[in-house]
């Protein structure tokens, strides 16, 4: 009976599990942040590409090659 009581009260592995859970949450937060940043960069580059295409189209229609 003493062995079972000692086994149930032993918490030496609990710390490793807690650190593992904290690490998993940190990685989840990092992945979420990187995904959001990646989407923002994609939107920014798509906007820049659309503006450049529009500027080139306007320049071609007006017959000018630059400012």
Image: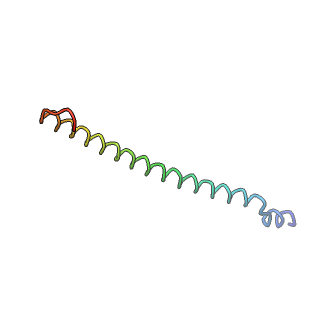
Rendered residue at 68%/57% (across/down): 19
Q: Which sits in the foreground, 5 or 27?
A: 27
The answer to which quarter of the image holds residue 63 is: top left
Whole-percent x, y for residue 29 in the image: 53, 55
Whole-percent x, y for residue 41 in the image: 39, 46
Image quadrant where one finds the C terminus:
top left
Q: Residue furthest right?
A: 2
Image quadrant where one finds the N terminus:
bottom right
Left or right of 21? Residue 31 is left
Rendered residue at 29%/40% (across/down): 49
Left or right of 7? Residue 67 is left
Rendered residue at 73%/60% (across/down): 15
Left or right of 38? Residue 50 is left
Is residue 41 depicted above or below 7 in this figure? above
Whole-percent x, y for residue 66 in the image: 22, 35
Whole-percent x, y for residue 2 in the image: 87, 66
Left or right of 19? Residue 10 is right
């Amino acid at each position: 009976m003493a062995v079972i009581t000692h086994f149930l009260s032993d918490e030496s592995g609990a710390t490793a599990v807690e650190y593992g859970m904290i690490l998993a949450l940190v990685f989840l937060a990092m992945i979420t942040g990187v995904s959001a940043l990646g989407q923002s960069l994609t939107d920014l580059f798509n906007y820049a590409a659309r503006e450049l295409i529009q500027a080139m189209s306007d320049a071609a229609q007006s017959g000018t090659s630059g400012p």
